[in-house]
Structures are given as structure tokens and as C-alpha cells.
Image (spheres, rainbow, N blue to C red):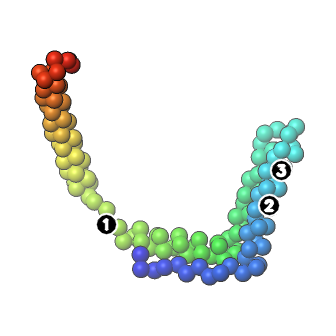
Amino acid sequence: MTDEIKIQDAGTADKAKLYAAIVIVIAGVAGYYYLATQATWVRWMPVLGSLVLGALVVAFSAYGRAFREFVTLARVELRKIVWPTRQETGMTTLVVFGFVIVFGIFFWLLDLVLAWATKTLTGQGG
């Protein structure tokens, strides 16, 4: 990939956003345990809310911008892939199956020869 993401040194505000997101998620998990007597779906609400809120906080930091840029560049690279046609895929699959069968038979015959040689030389074996 010729395009490189240059990650600049995160500033104090971006680090604070990252730490705030971590604290938010921890608070959501703590809320799950705090609501131990409630229904299960009620207990999961703080966890889900904290994950969404934490993701939003990180999204507006340098880390979030770098991640969005990475995803954009990955999608550009994905568009450059030349996918095989259905016929090419079928032919490749047949070739692979053919090689598997040929080499399976080869190793089975090799095993028979080595077993015969072992029995002939040592008098042991099946």
C-alpha cells in the first residue's frame, strides 16, 4: 500500500479523550453489577450505553480520525482486487481436488511400500 497513515503524536486532549472513554466503559460495567437485582436486559443497558458513548468519545479524537482514514484506505485497496470468475473458481477447485486425490494415493502407496520394507527387514509390523 503506497498510502501510509501518518499518526502524529497524540496531544493531551486526545489522550484525555481516550482515558475518558475507558472510564466510561468501566462505569458501564460497574453499572451492570450495581443493578444486580434488576432484569437482565436492564442490567445490560449501562454496558451498551457506555460502549456507544465511549466509541463516540474516541471517534472525535486523533485515534478515531486515524481509524477512519485507515478504513477509507482499506476500502480503496479492496476495490483494486480482481476477483476470479465463477468458472475460474470452479476450475481451481477441481485442480485442487485432483492434486489431493493424486497425492493421497501416492502417500498411501508410499506407506504400503515402507510398511512392507519394515516387515521384510525387521520381521515386525503389519
First in sequence, mark 2 or 1: give its number.
2
Which quadrant: the N terminus? bottom left
The crowding category of the residue bearing disc 2, from other C-alpha atoms within 10 Å (few below 14, some 14 to 19, many at least 20), is many
Q: CA distance from mark 3 to mark 1?
A: 48 Å
Circles 3, 2 touching at the beta carbon (< 8 Å): no
Q: Nearer the viewer, mark 3 or mark 1?
A: 3
Q: Residue at x 16, y 21 (%)?
A: 122
For disc 3, the marked residue is 30
Q: Horizontal placement of 101 versus 67: left or right?
A: left
Q: CA distance from mark 2 to mark 1?
A: 43 Å
Q: Residue at x 73, y 76 (%)?
A: 14
**Amino acid on which disc 3 is placed:** Ala
The image quadrant of residue 65 is: bottom right
Q: Residue at x 55, y 81 (%)?
A: 6
Q: Residue at x 13, y 26 (%)?
A: 117
| Camera-side residue of 114 and 79 | 114
Q: Nearer the viewer, mark 2 or mark 1?
A: 2
For disc 1, the marked residue is 82
Q: CA distance from mark 3 to mark 2?
A: 10 Å
For disc 2, the marked residue is 24
Q: Horizontal placement of 37 versus 105: left or right?
A: right
The crowding category of the residue bearing disc 3, from other C-alpha atoms within 10 Å (few below 14, some 14 to 19, many at least 20), is some
**Amino acid on which disc 2 is placed:** Ile
